[in-house]
Amino acid sequence: MMLVDCQSFYASVEKAAHPAYKDRPVAVAGDPARRSGIILAACPLAKARGVTTAERLGEALAKCPDLVVIRPRMQTYITVSLLLTEIFESFTDLVEPFSIDEQFLDVTGSLAYFGSPERIARRIQDKVMTSTGVRVRIGISSTKILAKMACDIWAKKNDSGVFTLPKRDIADYLWPQPVHRMYGVASRMTAHFQRMGLLTIGDIARLPLGELKRRMKRRMGRNSDIMAELFWQTARGEDPSPVVAATRTEQKAIGHGMTLPTDYGRLEDIEVVLLELAEEVCRRCRLQGRMGRTVFVGCQGADFDRPTGFHRQTTLPEPSNLTVEVAKAARELFAKHWNGLPVRKLSVALGQLTGDSVRQLTLFEDREKQRRLEKASDEIKNRFGAASIMRASSLLQSGQARERAAKIGGHYK
């Protein structure tokens, strides 16, 4: 098994695209023009100057005034990630994306043709660098979890960018590592383990599973048994999951949500966004040939220390993928449950999905005419872009569709 990780992925893509920045500190961040947002990626030169991922752009510029800040281009990064998948598939057909910049590979069946795992890793590094200008680090082991930790703990730190961690050697290499280096252990869980006297990964691995469950139950409550077993198996390098080229399950619901630029406190402003969300959900349903009967609406306030909001659902008389019907249900559901507190996040989803090949006709509404109208709108958007045709309400100050059309996952394409 291999875990291939791209070094400072977004920043590396930008440096490859801008050779003039080769020897300059580069970071990818929210909106350089406004000097706002957070650092999404920083190149090694920027990190050496103290710039860290997820810190505010202003803080990064205070540390590194000559930092080159580039606005993210998410579509470009997605395209490069797909190119990486194609490169990996030239070595093995067992490639499983783990994130946009990490992918698992099973090269067991490729050894006779390409040579040892280390040789394959070096060839992958050379091919990726030649094709994209991105440096990759590769962890190698017998299981996915060990390959991941081999990459995170060692391959990312050594000069070659490759590290092999045989399972027979984990007692010598992995177990002496501090517990916070174990995959899945963040700062809060680290504090729990330290208070339980478990300071290294080996402390967890050597402990009988029953004793670990007992300690975690005493520390964290009755529902910690599954978590205890997961950490125990991770510490021992046990991971039966194979590398699967395609992991698709039947979709239970189709939804869309967004974080608003400011708190919305007026119902008429919120209804504009609910309509936009319903339109996007219905468009995706129509694209997939699906309809839904259950409408979900959710909202959340901006104060995460004192969370406010709700998630509610209602059932339509008949399955639908028509914007006007879903938006009407979403507006009514929101108005019924909203307590008037400011809203910062909104979401709409359709569940109880069925195919749209069989549709219920009505005597009092021309649903087929509405369906043809929305299909024509879909075709225009598919051909000329999401912002090529939109409702007049989206041009109001509260509307977000026009700006969102230029983004992927909240970031500019």
Image (cartoon, grey):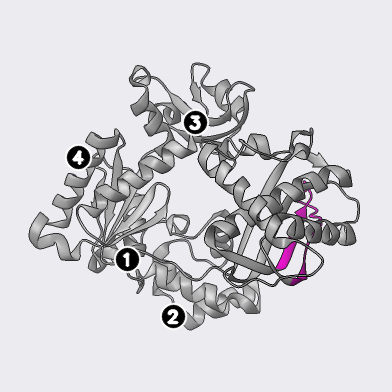
Task: Look at discs 2 and 4 and give the one toward the viewer.
Answer: 4
Q: Earlier in the sequence, mark 1 or mark 2?
A: 2
Q: Earlier in the sequence, mark 1 or mark 3?
A: 3
Label 3's element? Answer: strand
The front one of 400 and 146 is: 400
* Residue designated by label 4: 126
Q: Is residue 355 magenta-colored?
A: no
Coordinates of residue 329 in the picture (x, y in percent): 80, 61
Please, what is the three-letter code of the amino acid marked with disc 4? Answer: Asp
Q: Distance between the residues labelled 3 and 4?
A: 25 Å
* Residue designated by label 2: 208
Q: Earlier in the sequence, mark 2 or mark 4?
A: 4
Callout 1 crowding tier (Cα within 10 Å): few <14, some 14–19, many ≥20:
many
Please, what is the three-letter code of the amino acid marked with disc 1? Answer: Val
Q: Which of marks 3 and 4 is nearer the N terminus?
A: 3
Please, what is the three-letter code of the amino acid marked with disc 2? Answer: Pro
Q: Distance between the residues labelled 2 and 4?
A: 44 Å
Q: How far apart are marks 2 and 3 (CA)?
A: 45 Å
Q: How far apart are marks 1 and 2 (CA)?
A: 29 Å
Location of the N terminus by quadrant is: bottom left
Coordinates of residue 281 in the picture (x, y in percent): 64, 55
Highlighted magenta segment, given as a residue range: 294-317
Label 1's element? Answer: loop
Coordinates of residue 331 in the picture (x, y in percent): 82, 56
* Residue designated by label 3: 28
The front one of 273 and 108 is: 273
